[in-house]
Amino acid sequence: MSILVYGNLIGRQWRESSETFPVVHKYSNEILAAVSKSSREDVAEAVSCAAAAFRGHKLPVMKRYGILRKAAELFEARKEELAFTIVRECGKALRDARAEVERGIQTFIASAEEAKRIAGKEVPIQGQPGQEGKIAFTIRVPVGVICAITPFNFPFNLVAHKVAPALAAGNAIVLKPSELAPISAVKMAEILLEAGLPPGFLNIVNGSGEETGQYLLEDERIAMYTFTGSAGVGKHIKSSTGIRKVSLELGNNSPNIVHKDAPDIEKAIRLCVTRGFANNGQACISVQRIYVHRDIYHDFIEGAVSIASQLKVGNPELEDTLLGPMISEKAAMRAEEWIQEAVQQGARVAFGGVREGALLHPTILTEVTPDMKVVCQEVFAPVICIVPYDEVEEAMDAANHSSYGLQAGFFTSSLQLALKAAQRLEFGGVIINDASSYRADIMPYGGVKDSGIGKEGPYYAVQEMTEERIVVIDMG
C-alpha cells in the first residue's frame, strides 16, 4: 500500500524531498502520510519567496478580504474532511475536531473583516507651539515576512489565528506547523491557493523545531515571529530574534476558583471537569487547578467524580467518544509519572490515573500541595487537582502563585468579588462564572509572566502584525 507524501510549499510549488518523516494516526498508530523534511536551503528559499511576494505583489485590501472569505467557504464545504484530518493526526475527539474547524472558519471570516478596518488616526500636533500649518496622522503598514510556528493541539484553528490575520494585514508568511500534526496546515494552504492566494504569500516548511525552527530563527529577513508552544521555546525565540517583533502564546496551569456563593454549583462542577478533560487536557487554558471553598469541597469532589466516570475514552473517530489518545504514548507516560510522583508525595487519586498506551483516562487528584508538578507546572494532560480553601484571598494568592498567567476562572454571585478577582488575579484573562478555558476567537487572547507577550484574536493580531507609521505634512 502506497503512502501519501506531502511536500513543502515553496512559492508556487509543493516540493518533495528525499528525506521524510511519518505522521501517524494517534489511536491506531498506522502511518497516515510521509511529510517532506525541509533542508536549510528549503527554508532559505521559502523566505526568499515570501520576501519577493511581499515586495513585488502588494495585495489590495479587497483582494485580501475576498481570498479569506472564499477560503472560509471552501473550509465549510470540506468541514468533515478537515475534522477527520484533525482527529487522525492529533487524537482529538470527533465532536471537538468539528468544533475546531467551525472556529477556524469564524477566525478566517473575522480576519477578512479586519482587513477592511485597518486604520491609523489623526495626531493633533497643532496643539503644540510652532506647529501651525502642519497636519499629522498615522497609517498602519504590514511588517513584511512573518514566521509562524504552530503547535499540535489545535492544528487548524491555531494556524488560522496566525495565517489569516497575517494575510489580512498584507504580510507574507513562512509557516512551520508541528511535525506531529502538519497535515491540517497543508490542507489549509491548498485551500488558500484554490481561493486565489498568489504564490509566495504562504509558504510551508516542515520539520522539527530544533532544526527547521532554528533555521528560521537565523534568517534575518524575517520581520516578525509568532509562536504558540512551550515557555522554554518561547524564551529561546525571544533571545534569538534581537529587536525584531515577536508574539508568544505560551503555557499555563490554569487556576479556577469556585466560591461558596457560585450561582450554580452543579454548572461550575460540570464546566471545570469537562473543560479540564476536553482535548485530553492538551490546551494552554485547560482547567488544571481548582480551588473550592471548604463548605462545598466534598460535594464538588463527589460531583466531579460522577461526571468523570461518564466520559467515554477510546477511538476518537467514534461519535460518542469524549477523550481520545494524547499526542503520543511518551506524552501520556510523562503525565502518568507526574501522577504517580504526586501520589508518592501524599496526593490521593479520587478518580482515574489509568493509562493504556497513549490513552490516559481522566484523572482527579486531591490532597495535593503547591510544590507538586501536577500543581505548579503545566501538566498538559487530562489531570485536574481539587484544593480546598477557607478565605477567598487565600485562593487568589494560591492562583497567583505560579510562573504562568494566561487565564483564570472565578465562580461567584458577588459583583464585588468578581471585580476584585479581575483586579487581583495576575492573568491575561479572568473569566467570571465560566472556566479558564473559555475563549471567543475575536477576543484579545494572551498572557503575562511566562505565558507570553502579545495578543491573538484577529483585530489584535493585525495590530501586532502591522507597524504604525507617522505622516506629517507641512501645508505652508
Image (cartoon, rainbow, N blue to C red):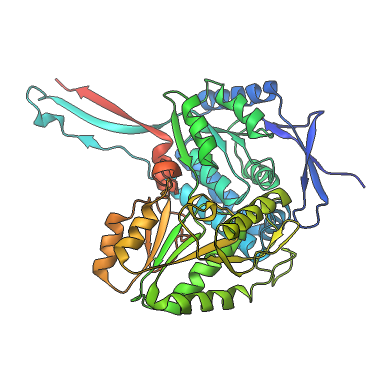
**270 left or right, relative to 6:** left
Identify the residue shown where x is 82% and y is 28%.
18
Identify the residue shown where x is 62% and y is 66%.
362
Q: Nearer the viewer, residue 18 or 361?
A: 361
Q: In x, y percent, where is residue 137?
A: 25, 32
The relative height of residue 299 versus residue 47 in the rendered view (above or below) is below
The relative height of residue 253 versus residue 171 in the rendered view (above or below) is below
Would you identify the image quadrant in which residue 134 lies? top left
Q: Does any portion of residue 197 appear in the rendered image?
A: yes
**169 left or right, relative to 28:** left
Q: In x, y percent, where is residue 3?
A: 86, 44
Would you identify the image quadrant in which residue 292 lies? bottom left
How many marks are shown on the rendered structure? 0
Q: In x, y percent, where is residue 250?
A: 49, 44
Q: Nearer the viewer, residue 304 or 22?
A: 304
- As drawn, the residue found furthest toward the right would be 1
Q: In x, y percent, where is residue 394?
A: 33, 61
Give the position of the C terminus as an image quadrant: top left
- As drawn, the residue found furthest toward the left would be 129
Q: Does any portion of residue 11 appear in the rendered image?
A: no
The relative height of residue 270 versus residue 380 in the rendered view (above or below) is below
Identify the residue shown where x is 31% and y is 67%.
391
Q: Nearer the viewer, residue 62 or 19?
A: 19
